Amino acid sequence: MVIPRPRVILYLENNERLRELVCDVLEFAGWYVKATPDSVHAWATLDCSKEHFDLLLFDHEVRGINGLELVRRVRRMPHRQPTPIILISLEDLEGEAREAGADAFLRKPNNLIELVDTIRRLFGETRAG
Protein backbone atom coordinates (compact mmCIF):
# COMPACT_ATOMS: atom_id res chain seq x y z
CA MET A 1 0.00 0.00 0.00
CA VAL A 2 1.38 3.40 -1.01
CA ILE A 3 0.84 6.17 1.51
CA PRO A 4 0.44 9.51 -0.29
CA ARG A 5 2.84 12.22 0.79
CA PRO A 6 1.26 15.20 2.49
CA ARG A 7 0.95 18.33 0.41
CA VAL A 8 3.57 20.93 1.26
CA ILE A 9 2.72 24.59 1.79
CA LEU A 10 5.26 27.42 1.99
CA TYR A 11 3.81 30.02 4.33
CA LEU A 12 5.20 33.55 4.67
CA GLU A 13 3.96 35.45 7.73
CA ASN A 14 5.95 37.83 9.94
CA ASN A 15 3.49 37.81 12.86
CA GLU A 16 4.77 34.95 15.03
CA ARG A 17 1.50 34.23 16.84
CA LEU A 18 -0.56 34.22 13.67
CA ARG A 19 2.07 32.09 11.90
CA GLU A 20 1.96 29.48 14.68
CA LEU A 21 -1.85 29.43 14.74
CA VAL A 22 -2.21 29.08 10.98
CA CYS A 23 0.48 26.38 10.88
CA ASP A 24 -1.39 24.41 13.55
CA VAL A 25 -4.68 24.69 11.64
CA LEU A 26 -3.14 23.70 8.30
CA GLU A 27 -1.22 20.79 9.79
CA PHE A 28 -4.40 19.62 11.52
CA ALA A 29 -6.03 19.66 8.07
CA GLY A 30 -3.35 17.20 6.94
CA TRP A 31 -0.79 19.37 5.19
CA TYR A 32 2.89 19.95 5.94
CA VAL A 33 3.75 23.63 6.38
CA LYS A 34 7.17 25.16 5.93
CA ALA A 35 6.84 28.57 7.56
CA THR A 36 9.13 31.54 7.11
CA PRO A 37 8.98 34.87 8.93
CA ASP A 38 10.32 37.10 6.17
CA SER A 39 10.31 37.54 2.43
CA VAL A 40 14.10 37.30 2.12
CA HIS A 41 14.04 33.68 3.32
CA ALA A 42 10.91 32.90 1.31
CA TRP A 43 12.45 34.29 -1.88
CA ALA A 44 15.75 32.48 -1.28
CA THR A 45 13.87 29.22 -0.81
CA LEU A 46 11.85 29.72 -3.98
CA ASP A 47 14.65 31.09 -6.13
CA CYS A 48 17.65 29.02 -5.07
CA SER A 49 16.16 25.61 -4.41
CA LYS A 50 14.26 23.04 -6.38
CA GLU A 51 12.23 22.21 -3.26
CA HIS A 52 8.69 21.29 -4.24
CA PHE A 53 5.71 23.17 -2.84
CA ASP A 54 2.10 22.33 -3.59
CA LEU A 55 0.90 25.79 -2.55
CA LEU A 56 2.35 29.17 -1.62
CA LEU A 57 0.63 31.27 1.05
CA PHE A 58 1.97 34.83 1.34
CA ASP A 59 1.10 37.66 3.67
CA HIS A 60 1.36 40.98 1.84
CA GLU A 61 2.47 43.09 4.80
CA VAL A 62 6.02 41.85 5.35
CA ARG A 63 9.36 43.63 5.44
CA GLY A 64 11.46 43.47 2.33
CA ILE A 65 9.70 42.11 -0.71
CA ASN A 66 5.96 42.54 -0.12
CA GLY A 67 3.52 39.77 -0.93
CA LEU A 68 2.35 41.24 -4.25
CA GLU A 69 5.91 41.57 -5.54
CA LEU A 70 6.69 38.06 -4.37
CA VAL A 71 3.69 36.74 -6.35
CA ARG A 72 4.92 38.59 -9.46
CA ARG A 73 8.44 37.16 -9.09
CA VAL A 74 7.21 33.62 -8.55
CA ARG A 75 5.00 33.80 -11.64
CA ARG A 76 8.09 34.60 -13.74
CA MET A 77 9.75 31.34 -12.61
CA PRO A 78 8.88 28.57 -15.08
CA HIS A 79 9.10 25.75 -12.52
CA ARG A 80 6.85 27.65 -10.06
CA GLN A 81 4.19 28.92 -12.49
CA PRO A 82 1.73 26.05 -11.93
CA THR A 83 1.96 26.34 -8.12
CA PRO A 84 -1.22 27.86 -6.64
CA ILE A 85 -0.67 31.06 -4.67
CA ILE A 86 -2.88 32.63 -2.01
CA LEU A 87 -2.21 36.22 -0.98
CA ILE A 88 -3.56 37.48 2.34
CA SER A 89 -3.64 41.12 3.38
CA LEU A 90 -5.19 43.65 5.73
CA GLU A 91 -5.69 45.83 2.65
CA ASP A 92 -8.29 45.21 -0.04
CA LEU A 93 -5.89 44.05 -2.76
CA GLU A 94 -7.94 41.39 -4.50
CA GLY A 95 -7.71 42.99 -7.96
CA GLU A 96 -3.98 43.61 -7.63
CA ALA A 97 -3.43 40.09 -6.28
CA ARG A 98 -5.24 38.50 -9.23
CA GLU A 99 -3.38 40.75 -11.69
CA ALA A 100 -0.05 39.75 -10.12
CA GLY A 101 -0.91 36.07 -10.58
CA ALA A 102 -2.44 34.97 -7.27
CA ASP A 103 -5.03 32.21 -7.53
CA ALA A 104 -6.90 33.42 -4.45
CA PHE A 105 -7.00 36.41 -2.14
CA LEU A 106 -8.18 36.51 1.47
CA ARG A 107 -8.60 39.61 3.59
CA LYS A 108 -7.16 39.56 7.12
CA PRO A 109 -8.32 38.96 9.68
CA ASN A 110 -9.83 36.02 7.92
CA ASN A 111 -11.75 33.04 9.12
CA LEU A 112 -9.39 30.06 9.28
CA ILE A 113 -12.12 27.82 7.94
CA GLU A 114 -12.25 30.01 4.84
CA LEU A 115 -8.49 29.59 4.44
CA VAL A 116 -8.71 25.80 4.77
CA ASP A 117 -11.66 25.68 2.33
CA THR A 118 -9.79 27.87 -0.16
CA ILE A 119 -6.75 25.61 -0.03
CA ARG A 120 -8.92 22.50 -0.44
CA ARG A 121 -10.57 24.10 -3.47
CA LEU A 122 -7.21 24.90 -5.04
CA PHE A 123 -6.04 21.35 -4.40
CA GLY A 124 -9.25 19.94 -5.87
CA GLU A 125 -10.06 18.27 -2.56
CA THR A 126 -13.49 17.91 -1.06
CA ARG A 127 -14.26 18.42 2.57
CA ALA A 128 -14.44 15.20 4.60
CA GLY A 129 -17.55 14.52 6.58
Image (cartoon, rainbow, N blue to C red):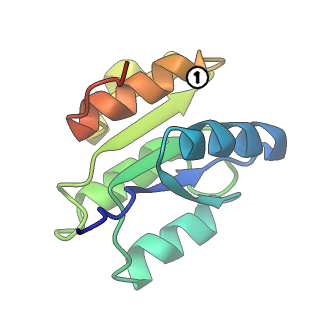
In the picture as drawn, the residue positioned furthest to the right comes out as 17
**Closer to the camera in the image, 15 or 122:** 122
Total marks shown come to 1
Q: Is residue 4 visible from the viewing direction of this image?
A: yes
Residue 69 in the image: state x and y as whole percent: 44, 50
Which quadrant of the rendered structure holds the C terminus? top left
Left or right for 108, reference 8: right
Q: Is residue 97 visible from the viewing direction of this image?
A: no
Q: Residue at x 25, y 55 (%)?
A: 75
Left or right for 53, reference 12: left
Vertical relation: 41 (above or below) 6: below
**Closer to the camera in the image, 28 or 83:** 28
Q: Which residue is mark 1?
A: 112
**Closer to the camera in the image, 7 or 115:** 7
Q: Residue at x 29, y 62 (%)?
A: 4
Residue 7 in the image: state x and y as whole percent: 37, 56
Question: Is the residue marked by circle 1 packed among few (<14), some (14-19), or many (20+) residues within 10 Å?
Answer: some
| Secondary structure category for the residue under label 1 | helix
Residue 104 in the image: state x and y as whole percent: 33, 29
Q: Residue at x 50, y 38 (%)?
A: 29
Vertical relation: 8 (above or below) 103: below
Which quadrant of the rendered structure holds the N terminus? bottom left
Left or right for 20, reference 122: right
Q: Amino acid at mark 1?
A: Leu
Residue 76 in the image: state x and y as whole percent: 23, 62
Vertical relation: 29 (above or below) 11: above
Left or right for 96, reference 21: left
Q: Residue at x 59, y 17 (%)?
A: 110
Vertical relation: 7 (above or below) 121: below
**Closer to the camera in the image, 117 or 19:** 117
